[in-house]
Amino acid sequence: MLVIKNIVCPICGCLCDDIEATVEDNKIIKVKNSCSVSATKFLNYYKERNLSPLIRENSELKPASIQEAINKTAEILMNADLPVIYGFACTGCETQSVGVELAEEVGGIIDNQTVTCHGPSALGLHDQGMPSCTLGEIRHRADLIVYWGSNFQESHPRHLARYSALSEGRFRKGRKDRKLVVIDVRKTPSARLADLYIPIEPGQDYELMSALRMALQFDEIEEESVAGLSIEQIEELAEMMRSCEFGVLFYGLGLTMSRGKERNIDMAISLVRDLNKWTKFVIMPMRGHYNVTGMNEVTAWQTGYPYAVDFSHGYPYYSPGETTFTDLLRRGECDAALIVASDPLAHFPKDVAKNLCKIPYAVIDPHLSMTALAAEVVIPCAFTGIEAEGSAYRMDTVPLPLKKVVDPPSGIYPDEEIVSMILKTIKSKRR
Amino acid sequence: MELLIKNGIVYDPINGIDGEIMDIAIRDNKIVEKVDESKSYVINASNKLVMPGGVDLHSHIAGPKCNVGRMLRPEDHYKDVEPKTQVKRSGVGYSVPSSFTIGYRYAILGYTTVFEPANPPLKMLHCHHEFKDIPILDKGCLVMFGNNWFVMEYLRDNKLDECAAYVAWTLNATKGYAIKLVDPGCVEAWKWGDVEFLDVLWGRPETMDEPVPRFDVTAKDIVRGLCKVNKLLNLPHPIHVHANGLGTPGNYQTTIDTMDCVKDLAKEDGPIIHLTHVQFNGYAGSDWITMRSGAHEIMKYVNANKHVSLDLGQVIFTDTTTMTGDGPFEYKLHLLTKNKWTNSDVENEEGAGLVPIHYKKSNFVHATMWTIGLELALLAKDPWRIFMTTDHPNGGPFTHYPKVIAWLMSKEARKRTLEKISKRARSRSDLDNMDREYSFYEIAIITRAATAKILGLKDKGHLGVGADADVAIYDINPREVDPSSEYKKIRKALSKATFTLKDGEIIVKDGEIVKSVEGRTYWVKPSVPEDLMNAMESNLVKKFRDYYTVEMENFKIPDRFIARSSPIPTHYS
């Protein structure tokens, strides 16, 4: 029996790094410090695994050798005019790095899950910048914590305890020293923990933030109510934000993926920027997949842009809406794909998902995901962070090394190696 | 592999070679006494300028703030792209280039070693991630300590040895190279948005004696303390200081105070404090109306005091991105320019911020900044203690270095630019009366020899036997060209090296990348008495739990992340 400590949890953007696992016969039998989502993963990762590469023959997925699967994937990518390499939010930076190189080699597009989650945050950053900090700053200093459009209790279960309202910091001794505000369209489990829950009418976020900015400047708001809130309520909230010592605005998909999208984020950043004239205030997106932040980082340092990068010109070209996977699929512009550590068929809008089924694509994933079931080629891989090493970036861009806790099943490679093999095959066929 | 560079006109100041025609022999990755010409690859360098590969000690090339810069500025990239070739990965420029592009563009300029000057310990892995993707160059990273809680507490409690042990532990854990201080004490105040305290420091330079709120230690204590730590650990590079009050009229006095506060710690054998991008810290006057150059006052001090070195932070008239660990300054710049702004405070440690800027000739302040950088260089009596930088990308992208060199080598070049800048700036500047023109020998000093020396890299910056075979060859004949009038030729020749050799391999030929190799990562491995280290480390365990949001084990960067790891051991004294 072996106890491994300080494991970084490869689930959500919190990247809690204090997980303790007990390993027996190359199996994790017990975990400590995990949230329920994390524990479920650590204790069940090995179940229902597909252990054989699969290739579609006569509309049926049939077992194949790894080399056959790699050759077939290479063939699909090389025969395409505009292949897309997509995913990578649930794997290490090392795999992501090879993914970018592969997209460059085939003259395709590299894109990631940002397109369906915090793409608007990237666009907001382009437009306005982003006053932010690491999570420890919030732990030590924040006396006002606002979650907007984020049900953190279910999406990031330990966020509150490790990094925000419940954490104990140098200058804040815990929950009693902080005020917790939750703004959401419904009373989520997170909202029930708040000192102040503000129900907001769906799709009215932009309006409410504009009103808050006006209230901050003591401008008169000539409306009866905004987003379902009375002007007095808005002025009260503005005053609360203005008069705190250190405030933070965490926001989730409720803000990025509702009406307004990147305009919402523009407005949220502008609000926080304005607040800095009065006090210290920061803003942070609640990134979901554990290493989607890392994929943005890797793509940015290698190409200059955080996602949706098109190499078909021979150099990086970026135009979200034009070079994003969802939009390419909707318009039927891409003709093949390699999907790594992602399950887009389960998450994309229906018409986009339908179009994905029309093009040949390969999937690299530890599990037989919904996307894998409709693929031409499926290559099973090890779980990065459990069965393979790597590194990942927390939602606040703090990088952390990922551990290999147990060995992968025999014959199963880390996705980094698989993507490298595909790249090598393509390079050798070209030269 | 043997290689012979024949008949080049060689400038190698460390070995006292000033434009001699000679051969340079290379075996594998080192410079040797001689090689057998018949068996060697011969580069005919007759009538060409030969220098050691360039060494840049302060250029923001990797790490969290560079990457925020890339994400902040897509508009910066559209206009400047690098297509993929057989040997090159694709990428983008301009002021915040992608990683691969940084390596290629430096190599084309004839540079082979570049140091990233400011990363917070907690995010050092990010820096090493990017280092892996910067080809060709040898690299190292300076680690910020100037607002570190643990450092401030050790210094407040007069625990210098523990402080040294902590710094050593952190450099070792994060694979850093030297101690960097950025706006010591003030970033901590900024983390509270403590504008009152910052006003004090921005407005009245004498207040380096003002205690940092909640920490009861002054900026001066921090500078002195870390200078002593540096001495205890015998680190190869002196403390590297971004002084308080950057970008504020009147700050030249703070810069002098910063240098002066460690004067009594000076050693015989050279600088113990490096003041960086001094142009940004060299303003006289009391506001933006009365602002003028403080270069004369600063250089008077520097010329008289051997314990100091500095680099320029020269401004280029172009669109660029400012990025610094000095979060409060960037907020101020945001308020001034209304340009988009990012801020990234890091727990227990430091901060950072970014704001894009366009330096304009017509703008009085920008034009004055341009004159200050050049004045500093022209007033320097000892070129071994002043280095050419643009604080890339803060003053302008490094790709403009040849322009700076032309300004330094030619009064005429300066005059041509002076004629076009703000009249008010011109009339207040002394630049027009400065006749000095740098020689090729002096240029070799301020761009490679002296920078290698101050970084403590014994095998860099020279072409003597045993040196790393990093060589730059430029298509210009220094014996024939008159830099004073033919400055455009200088600019052109230095923009594209005819050859750049890295570790004895030809990387650049006729201004194009022909091969890409992996560069080293230099880091220091200070040894500290075992009992001292153990005592410090057992205390640190609790501090980590109390103050960091990561476990101590995960803070340490495993060796697998370091590209061509090259540790430099140092000894405690």
Image: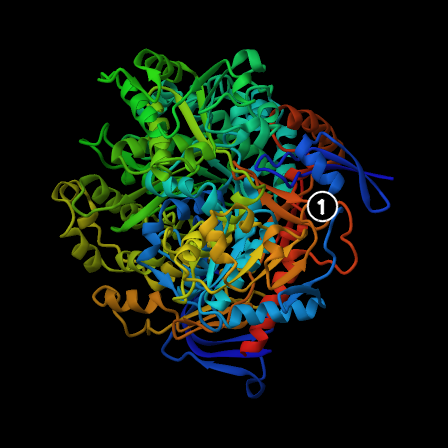
* Residue A124 location, quadrant: top left
Q: Is residue A124 left or right of residue B155?
A: left
* Label 1 crowd (10 A; few <14 / some 14-19 / many >=20): many
- Left or right relative to A316: residue B503: right
Q: Quadrant of residue B98?
A: bottom left
Chain designation of label 1: A
Amino acid bearing label 1: Ile
Residue situated in front as seen by the camera: A383 or B336: A383
Residue A164 makes an appearance in the image: yes
Label tally: 1
Location of residue B161 (image quadrant): top right
x, y percent for residue A84: 49, 60
Quadrant position of the N terminus of chain B in the picture: bottom right
Apparent side of residue A348 relative to residue B381 in the rendered image (left or right): right
Residue furthest to the bottom: B38
Question: What colour scheme does the image use?
Answer: rainbow
- Which residue is disc 1 drawn over? A386
- Image coordinates of residue A407 in percent, x first then y, are 78, 51
Picture residue at 65% right of the left edge, 56% below the top: A415
Helix, strand or loop status at disc 1: loop
Of residue B132 and residue A150, the one placed in the foreground of this image is A150
Q: Quadrant of the C terminus of chain B?
A: top right
Whether residue B237 can be seen here:
no
Task: Tell me residue A91's x, y (percent).
Answer: 61, 49
Residue located at (30% from left, 22% from top): A211
Residue nearest the observer in this picture, B399 or B417 = B399
In the rendered image, residue A321, in percent from the top left (x then y), is placed at 37, 51
Residue B111 vs A261, above or below: the answer is below
Residue A76 is left or right of residue A381, and the answer is left
